[in-house]
Amino acid sequence: MIKRMYDWVLHWAETPYGTWALFFLAFAESSFFPVPPDVLLITLAISIPAKSFRYALVCSAGSIAGGALGYLIGLQLMEVAGFRIIDFYGLSEEYTSIGDLYNRYNAWAVMIAGFTPIPYKIFTIAGGAFQIDFSVFMAASAISRTARFFLVAWFIYLFGAGIRLFIDKYFNLLTVLFTVLLAGGFILIKYIV
């Protein structure tokens, strides 16, 4: 099943809609959707390494805009949608602790969530719910998400198609590693908060 999803993502890189798909995937992932945009970013950038930074910019823009939607969900729609999203990820108990992180670390909490495998969407929603300063939230999101996606683009730009062969050869191992990192992000939230 994972290999089919990987092939489906590769398909977007071969269509004229790949860039739009990347934007919308990054947008949705930052506010409610569980699939991270990194897979599509990597696939598109590998298909045309010279456009790696352009794809990183599109991914960053979608993610930052999606983060603003997550903030709005937390600010205006917490009862209707925000708690449902948080419940979906099993982080209801940690929700209040995330508020404490915002009180102590403000922008750093957003930046860490934006750059690491910690589920960024939980922090975007909590940012609105706890009404952290929107300009600080957006600046921290812009820095961390852009740094994350441009780092990926830089590696692809440097190594080009060789990375694709590496990914194809070690796909199962990389999938396990990515899943462990993603799960580790959830576990890290539970221990931090």
Image (cartoon, rainbow, N blue to C red):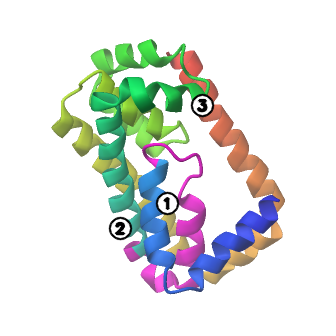
Residue at 37% x, 68% y: name it: 58
Most prominent secondary structure in the magenta stretch? helix
Residue type highlighted by circle 3: Phe
Closest to the observer: 185 or 158?
185
Quadrant of the rendered structure where residue 98 is?
top left
Residue 134 on image: x %, y %: 19, 36
Q: CA gap, disc 3 to disc 2?
A: 29 Å
- According to the picture, the residue beneath numbered tag 2 turns out to be 57
Residue 17 on image: x %, y %: 49, 80
Q: CA gap, disc 1 to disc 2?
A: 13 Å
Asked if marks 3 and 2 touch (Cβ < 8 Å), the reply is: no
Closest to the observer: 187 or 153?
187
Closest to the observer: 14 or 147?
14
Which range is magenta?
30-54
Secondary element at tag 2: helix
Residue 127 on image: x %, y %: 32, 29
* Relative horizontal placement of residue 18, taking residue 127 as reference (left or right): right
Foreground tag (3 vs 2)? 3
- According to the picture, the residue beneath numbered tag 3 turns out to be 88
Quadrant of the rendered structure where residue 47 is?
bottom right
Residue 111 on image: x %, y %: 36, 38
Circle on res. 25: 1
Residue type highlighted by circle 2: Leu
* Mark with earlier residue (3, 2): 2
Residue at 60% x, 73% y: name it: 43
Secondary element at tag 3: helix
Residue 163 seen: no
Residue at 54% x, 76% y: name it: 44
In reply to whether residue 137 is colored magenta, the answer given is no
Secondary element at tag 1: helix
Residue type highlighted by circle 1: Leu
